Image (cartoon, rainbow, N blue to C red):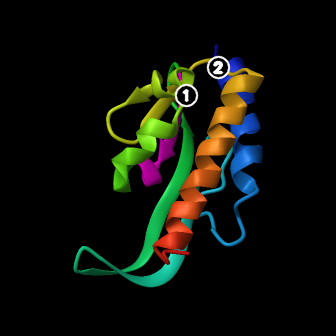
């Protein structure tokens, strides 16, 4: 199981790494990876120097795919296909236990939509 999770993590990390410009990782490890926008922002009246975009972490029996655009705009859920949406646990974490090409494509599509949202809001 752990070997399969490592393979899932590596495949998803490769997809997320495509967004390292304009985003930057805080963690780029073998079991944890994330992407942030480092920019002076004001969101809901609070000043920030950064905002989280997405990340991965290997847990005991799944790879957690954290996707903040869905948290900041719950309407994004409407564009996800049922296969990906069924893996959403909580507000912004998807539990990935197995990965196929269709699910990879859905995650890549979600990332593209998330980047567009962050750009529209001038968070990137």
Marks 1 and 2, Cα distance to the nearest angstrom? 27 Å
Residue under label 1: 81
Depth order, front residue of 41/7: 41
Residue drawn at x 64%, y 53% is 112
Q: Which residues are magenta?
A: 62-70
Q: Can the viewer see residue 35 in this picture? A: no
Indicate the position of residue 29 as horizontal and vertical percent values: 66, 50
- Residue 41 to residue 8: above or below: below
- Residue 37 to residue 112: above or below: below
SS at badge 2: helix
- Between label 1 and label 2, give the one nearer the viewer: 1
Indicate the position of residue 64 as horizontal and vertical percent values: 51, 34
The image quarter in which residue 50 lies: bottom left
Residues tagged 1 and 2 counted as in contact (Cβ below 8 A): no
Instruction: Name the outermost residue toward the top.
Output: 1
Residue under label 2: 2
Disc 1: CA contacts within 10 A as few (<14), some (14-19) or many (>=20): few
Indicate the position of residue 106 as horizontal and vertical percent values: 64, 34
């Amino acid at each position: 199981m752990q070997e399969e999770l490592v393979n899932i993590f590596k495949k998803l990390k490769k997809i997320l790494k495509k967004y390292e410009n304009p985003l930057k990782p805080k963690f780029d490890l073998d079991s944890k990876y994330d992407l942030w926008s480092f920019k002076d922002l004001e969101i809901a009246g609070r000043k920030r120097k950064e905002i989280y975009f997405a990340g991965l972490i290997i847990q005991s029996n799944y790879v957690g795919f954290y996707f903040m655009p869905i948290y900041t705009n719950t309407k994004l859920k409407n564009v996800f296909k049922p296969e990906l949406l069924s893996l959403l646990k909580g507000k912004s974490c998807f539990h990935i236990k197995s990965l196929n090409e269709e699910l990879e494509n859905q995650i890549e599509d979600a990332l593209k939509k998330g980047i567009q949202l962050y750009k529209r809001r001038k968070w990137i």
